[in-house]
Image (cartoon, rainbow, N blue to C red):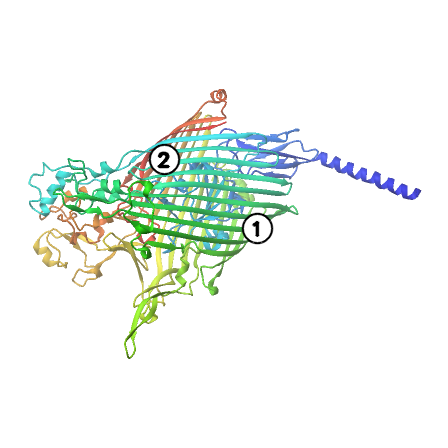
Amino acid sequence: MKKSGLIRKACFFLFVFLFSSTGILLAQERFLSGVVRDAETKEPLPGANVIIKGTTRGTITDLNGNFSLRLQAGDEALVVSFVGYNNKEIQPGSQQFVEVLLETEKVALGEIVVIGYGTVRKSDLTGSVSSVKAEEMTRITASNPVQGLMGKVAGVQVTNTSGAPGAAPVVRVRGVGTFNNSSPIYVVDGVILDDISFLNASDIASTEVLKDASATAIYGSRGANGVIIITTRSGSLTKGKTVFSYSGEYNLQMLAKKIDLLNGREFAIISNEIRPGSFNNVDAVPNTDWQDLIFHTAPMHNHQFSASGSTENMQFYFGVGYFNQQGIIDKSSYERLTIKLNNTYQLSKGIKLGNNLTIAPHKEQIAPNVTYSAYRAQPVLVPYYPDGSFGVVYNVGNPLADLKYSNNYNKGIRGVGNFFAEATLLKHFTLKSSFGLDASYNKAVSFTPEFTVYNPDGTASQQQNVGSDLYKGTGDFLGWLWENTLNYSQTFGKHTLDAVAGYTMQDNSSESYGISGQNILRDGRDFWYLQPSYLTNTINQFRNSVDPNQYYSMISYLFRVNYTYDGKYIFTTTFRRDGSSKFAPGNRFSNFPSFAAGWNITREKFMEAFPFVSNLKLRASWGIIGNDKIIYTDRFSTVNANLVSVFGVNPTAWPAATYSKSGNPDLKWESTYQTDIGLETGFFQNKLTAEFDFYNKVTKDILVELSTPGYLGNGQGQKVRFNAASVLNRGLEFQVNWREKKNDFSYSVGLLGSTIHNEVLKIGGNVGIDSVLIGGYLGNGIPVTQSRVGLPIGAFYGYKTNGIFQTPEELAAYPHSSQAEVGDLRFVDVNHDSKIDGNDRTFIGSPIPTFIYGFHFEAGYKDFELSLDLQGQTGNKIFNGKEVVRPDPYNFEKHVFNRWTGPGTSNTEPRPSFGGYNYSPSDRFVQDGSFLRLRNITFSYALPSGLSDKLQLSKAVLYLKGTNLYTLTKFTGYTPEIGSEDVLSNGIDNGIYPVTAVYSFGLNITF
């Protein structure tokens, strides 16, 4: 018993000793957190080094400049450093949180770059990735934040398809690589999306554009068109303090440029030349400017409020944004409310939970295309008769009547969220599981009342609607993405290894309903409902369908390893295997590998002889990436069962069926093979930086529709999709920046540009006789683009002109159409067969620019700052389609006054006519699409700190801003930015909603 008691006492004292020792050890360790900022701008510095003095222990700051570090006994000082900034030593003492302000010249943020499924130091990056700062994304006030990329990234072309409120731009990364959907994907907080129109630009913390195969291969079948990664804001690590901010902006939009059209008198003169006697007194005709009648100045509001902070175990960010844009054309508007909530919860030392959630209800009103009507409307006609009724505009329609009787509304809500859990395992491993959701619901309503515009004699004109019409439609979309990744990071002496492996699953589905009816009881909105008596033909007026672009499932396996030796030599290997339900079982899976290497030459010993060179890195990559943006139903055949066949001894009608469309079960992925060679340089402590990239991108197995023989059962020449085309995109990109600060004055200058060579390498092959893809159909049904081997995608196709037939002798001596007369265009006999016909149509221009560029200037003196952005392109053409379609006496552009009126009077502008021969698609209607645009100019003033303190504000900035104020171009239309999601219809101006000039006043405050 005594021995037993001694053992118990010994165990007790041993337990007390161990417990006390542990407590002593724990007491000797503590955690320190903090934030590193620019001393002048107070902007966080991501990627700053925080090292415990005298040791190799330390960490780097995250995207928000935050860090957390474990201190041991004897750790008295920290050394904080960032490229281009002076090192700073601090002694935290007993503080648990510190704010470190670094003093130095301004250098570009981006030391840490967000890439797919992770982050990497810029110096260790082997791919072509461009970063855009958060403040640059908000320089342009627009409904879609992607417009902030205009002129900001080499190799990226952002084109406004329309100036209508809420209109989405077209984005192309390194050219057009397919005949199908060429848009990049967007990754917002880990959720893969096709558009970001729901997002508030003020909620964005960083934007990265992934361009080459090394960067995009981690996204496999969706990386061929580029990847844009957006990280939204998170809470500050300043514990116990909440930072509030508000920004408000009032904008006035107006028409930037009118089209130079004939006035009433000029139109009467030309009309008399075409049809003598049309107007007896050209000086007494009305003079209506239809453009002035449909366009007006319109307001736009943009407001944001946010709260950011943290507690002991949680970071939070909450933001609310309100955007309201009224159009410069009546009955066009867009309104959106954005609610943003990002939270991170630290459950324990190694376990973290979080969510990123955005909810965005919106509504819009869509005006009819009255820009085209105003362009064609004759200026000698009046908008209203003396009794106030609408005037007739023959063969066009009165655009003001169209506006009055048109009622088109859309409204909906979209929610995008990501919920994740992250655990640190065995020090070097991080396991992360995230579940993303993308859900939307939309509702459309269109109502046209019964109306008639009467001729002066009281008879009904063609502009009328017999019986009121009502359409209602709904659509919903639900997509989810579950991703599980394991990251590994460790340094062994001079060796650093970072790797990630993962498994993902995704499912998308959508459905829409639509129904229409006539003879609605009343015109008021309270009566816009449908009941059975309104449905005159239920079978044809009810539609239920799914979106074939958004109905599929996918599973994927991914892997990437990045190895660095001594900070000098970097090697990256990426692999992804995707399987999609869009393809038949035999072709559902495909592999997408990439390989890259980099050499940080600056860190070599021999570079010590060149102290002015602060950065010099060479990198190269090769890989295969894919495009899955296809219509999955193309692999299925469809049957028409509404047929009858009569046969038998006693002729009898029997039900029959045949193929209405043949599918192709052998469809497979479009694959892009891309090579990239890049050079990154920095001089004079990175005051001067430059980056160059050469890329060569070949897309193979592109899906195209080819003619098929009649024995397939769906009719001779019917189209079926095959993997039967290839396209090349090749170019050189550069980006050069200079930044400097001298006392209270600082400035920066940046220039970027990229060349684009686009060429079709193959169409058809052995699967059919097709060698040309036709598109770009005008309003009269005539196509004006062809894609064929050796030419760019969507090249303009028509007659070449060679002057004007001046005399009857010249007309007789030159091949010509039977319709040609003296004073008409002289078309070139391209095939030299001594006649002019459709076989003489040829290549007359490309809508794809050969060079795109941007310029940025920013200067600051004390509390004042001026910034300026220019953007432009050259080498592309625009087809003025709105001028070609002319079957009736429409108005003319002013250049018609340079017309031919006799021998020697003009060799460029033919005799005037109301359509016919001279309006055949030709290079007469192809104009230079080059432009240089003052995209943005902003002047701001920050209230002095003393005044801000009195107002209890941390920061207050007032600013004036102008957007699209001036454009240098030869194009005669509203804007030279003519884009289309349909790559075969790109660059055709059929009368678009003009892009506006915007004048803004705004206020930003933080408290």
Check the image and report above or below for 557 versus 967: below
In percent of width and height, residue 892 lies at 18, 44
Decide: few, some or many residues near mark 1? Use Cα within 10 Å; few <14, some 14-19, many ≥20: some
Q: Which residue is mark 2?
A: 936
Residue at which label 1 appears: 485
Q: Quadrant of the N terminus?
A: top right
Relative to 850, residue 249 above or below: above
The secondary element bearing badge 2 is classed as strand
Q: Amino acid at mark 2?
A: Asn
- Note whether residue 971 is visible: no
* The furthest residue to the bottom: 649
Check disc 1 and give the amino acid type: Thr
Image coords of residue 852 (percent x, y): 35, 45
In the displayed image of the protein, which residue is found farthest to the right?
2
Looking at the image, is mark 1 or mark 2 nearer the viewer? 1
Residue 916 placement, left or right of 117: left
Residue 502 visible at all = yes
Horizontally, is 649 left or right of 126 in the view?
Answer: left
Percent across and percent down for residue 530 are 33, 48
Report, in whole angstroms, how far the alpha carbon at label 1 lies from the one at label 2.
41 Å
Residue appearing at x 9%, y 36% in the figure: 284
Secondary structure under the numbered disc 1 in the rendered image: strand
